[in-house]
Amino acid sequence: MDLPTEKQNEKLKVLFVCMGNICRSPMAEALFRHQVVSAGLADRFEIDSAGTHSYHVGERPHPGTQRVLYSHGVEVGDQRARQLRPGDFRTFDYIVAMDADNVADMTDYAPRVDKVYRLLDFSPNQALRDGPDPYYTGQFEEVYELVSHATKGLLAYIRRERGL
């Protein structure tokens, strides 16, 4: 059975979440967007990121995040930090947290916890389940590698789940 045209054209909405929305979640947003474009699926996705806290609202991604993305040929775009909103749980199909603390912080917002995933769960050969925060560690390259593998796994998961 074919899906109605409006369902076929409906964009899948993916939101990446970390604490301040200047390091990990904008990195994941940019990497996932890059992978979606490379797969020829840009018209099928809406991709965004947010923070559980308002510390950096309106700021550009951390210089370390920008530097590591550019060094790998990944465009940052015009991203600006924003805080997670309760409406995001109605709007987005997949809400992907960077660590267990982010998941716990989202329970205050979350009427639909079935949409919440942890990013590194999509990288099954990785022992870590929580992505380290390079804001504190300075390890932007290491975090890039973790996020890159996990976002590829997330895209593969969505493609299987949605038949893309």
Image (cartoon, grey):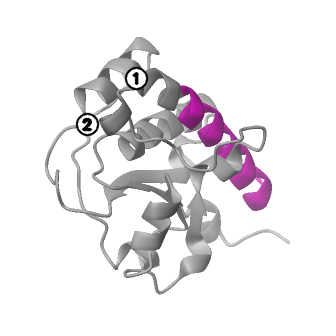
Q: Can residue 47 be seen in the rendering of this structure?
A: yes
| Residue at the image point whose x is 38% and y is 72% from the top | 88
The picture quadrant where one finds residue 37 is top right
Residue identifier under label 1:
69
Residue 102 shown left or right of residue 22 in the figure: right
Q: Can residue 13 be seen?
A: no
For disc 2, the marked residue is 61
Q: What stretch is highlighted in magenta?
A: 145-164
The kind of residue on which mark 2 rests is Pro
Residue at 32% x, 19% y is 67
Asked if 51 appears above or below 107 in the picture, the reply is above
The image shows residue 39 at horizontal and vertical percentages of: 64, 33
- Asked where in the image residue 46 lies, by quadrant, the reply is bottom left
Q: Given the current orientation, which residue lies at the most extreme right position?
A: 1
Q: Answer with left or right where residue 85 lies relative to residue 71.
A: left
Decide which of 46, 138 is in the foreground and name it.
138
* Residue placed furthest toward the left: 58
| Dot 1 alpha-carbon crowd within 10 angstroms: few under 14, some 14 to 19, many 20 or more | many
Q: Around disc 2, counting alpha carbons within 10 Å, would you say few (fewer than 14), some (14 to 19), or many (20 or more)? A: many
Residue 102: give x, y in percent of width and height.
Answer: 43, 62
